[in-house]
Image (cartoon, rainbow, N blue to C red):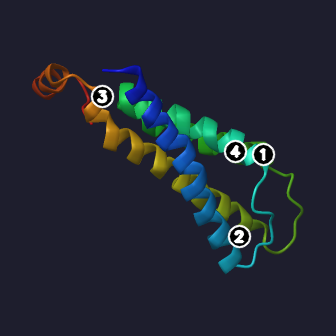
Amino acid sequence: MKIMNYVGVYILSLGGGWLIAGLAVYLMRKSIRIPREFFKVIDLWVGGTERAVATTLVLFAPHYLPGFIGGWVVLKFAANWQRQPNEPGVAQKSLAALVGSIFSFAVAIGAGLYCGPVLRHPAELIQAANDRSVVTV
């Protein structure tokens, strides 16, 4: 297990997530005619943070991942609660943000699952498969 393997996983998750999730959300918003600029710095920080944590959980504690995703989505929506004006299209924007989170998590989970077994020592994988108390990925 080399440190560069871990660096590669996080580069794939963070960089790939920014490109893939960002482009997917941009195209989705464009298709439903929700005007928004393509890039905001806050999106880079929020998306990068959620992907970094999700990738870490996929690699080291996968059983905590569903709770993190649920809690994170709730916190993101709570941060915007009652801040949106009561006008047409607000629900559509919220659903677009939810889909954006799903794209972001999908990239993080995919990177962790794709690279995770490479990072683990084969003896760890065998032990995890034999030990019923350990959740394997």
Task: State yes or no: discs 1 and 3 in contact (Cβ < 8 Å).
Answer: no
Say left or right for 71 vs 59.
Answer: right
Instruction: State which mark lies toward you, 1 or 2.
Output: 1
Q: Please, which residue is most extreme toward the right here?
A: 85
Q: Residue at x 70, y 39 (%)?
A: 45
Tell me if label 2 and label 4 are in contact, CB under 8 Å. no
Q: Which residue: 43% across, 30% down?
A: 57
Q: How far apart are marks 2 and 4 (CA)?
A: 22 Å
- Upstream in the sequence, badge 2 or badge 3? 2
Mark 2 neighbour density, 10 Å: few (under 14) some (14–19) many (20 or more): few
Kind of residue at disc 1: Val
Work out whether mark 2 precedes mark 4 in sequence or the reverse, and give the earlier one.
4
Q: Distance between the residues labelled 2 and 3?
A: 40 Å
**Is residue 120 shown above or below 111?**
above
Residue type at tag 3:
Leu
Dividing the picture into quadrants, the one containing residue 117 is top left
Residue bearing mark 3: 119
Of labels 4 and 3, earlier in sequence is 4
Structural distance between the alpha carbons of marks 1 and 3:
31 Å
Label 2 vs label 4, nearer the camera:
4
Which of pointers 1 and 3 lies earlier in the amino acid sequence?
1
Percent x, y for residue 135?
Answer: 26, 29
Amino acid of disc 2: Gln
Which label sits on residue 44?
A: 4
- At x 78% / y 67%, what residue is drawn? 90
Dot 1 or dot 2: first in sequence order is 1
Coordinates of residue 86 in the picture (x, y in percent): 87, 66
SS of the residue at dot 4? Answer: helix
Q: What amino acid type should be assigned to the residue bearing mark 4?
A: Leu
Q: In this picture, is 69 found above or below 128?
A: below
Which residue is label 2 attached to? Answer: 92
